[in-house]
Image (tube, grey):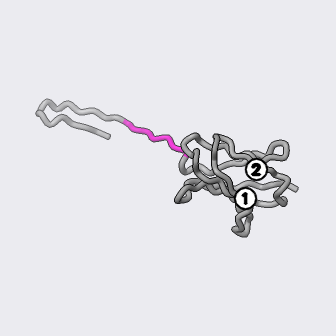
Amino acid sequence: VTATATDGTGVNGTIEIAIKSKKNEPLHAIIVGGEIRISLDEIYSGSKVSLYDLYGTLISSKPAKDTICTFEASTFKPGIYIIVLSNSVILRVGKFVLPG
């Protein structure tokens, strides 16, 4: 943004504004000790985390109560899964592979 004084002094200046947001970054899952862990920012507390299979079938869903949302991996078949974080609208998505 560049600003110029309007009082005739000819003073002007430039400032750069950088907005850092994870809003457009995909969600990631880490599989540790039989658990699927999805790391979330605190601002998403109260949102819903849903896991879908590759065909779009809802497999599991739970509220995001903390910065880590955990699902039991043993209840899932090996394959590709889609993570959806939502409230009234979809906020972020991601995918992960659950190995066999």
Q: Position of residue 95 (x, y in %)?
A: 70, 56
Q: Position of residue 60 (x, y in %)?
A: 72, 59
Left or right of 4 in this view: 34: right
Q: Is residue 18 magenta?
A: yes
Residue situated in front as seen by the camera: 99 or 2:
99
Q: Mark 2 packing: few (<14 Cα in 10 Å), some, or many (20+)?
A: some
Residue situated in front as seen by the camera: 65 or 16:
65
Q: Which residue is mark 2?
A: 71
Left or right of 62 in this view: 45: left
Q: Residue at x 81, y 43 (%)?
A: 32
- Quarter of the image for residue 90 reads bottom right
Residue 19, numbered circle? none
> The C terminus appears in which quarter of the rendering?
bottom right
**CB atoms of marks 1 and 2 within 8 Å:** yes
Above or below, 6 relative to 28: above
Left or right of 87 in this view: 17: left
Residue situated in front as seen by the camera: 31 or 11:
31
Q: Residue at x 84, y 60 (%)?
A: 77
Q: Which residue is mark 1?
A: 60
Amino acid residing under circle 2: Phe
Secondary structure mostly seen in magenta is loop
Q: Position of residue 45 (x, y in %)?
A: 58, 44
Q: Position of residue 74 (x, y in %)?
A: 85, 53
Q: Residue at x 72, y 48 (%)?
A: 29
Q: Which type of secondary structure does the marked residue at label 1 adopt? A: strand
Left or right of 60 in this view: 90: left
The magenta region covers 16-22
Above or below, 4 relative to 97: above
- Mark nearer the N terminus (1 vs 2): 1
Q: Which type of secondary structure does the marked residue at label 2 adopt? A: strand
Amino acid residing under circle 1: Ser
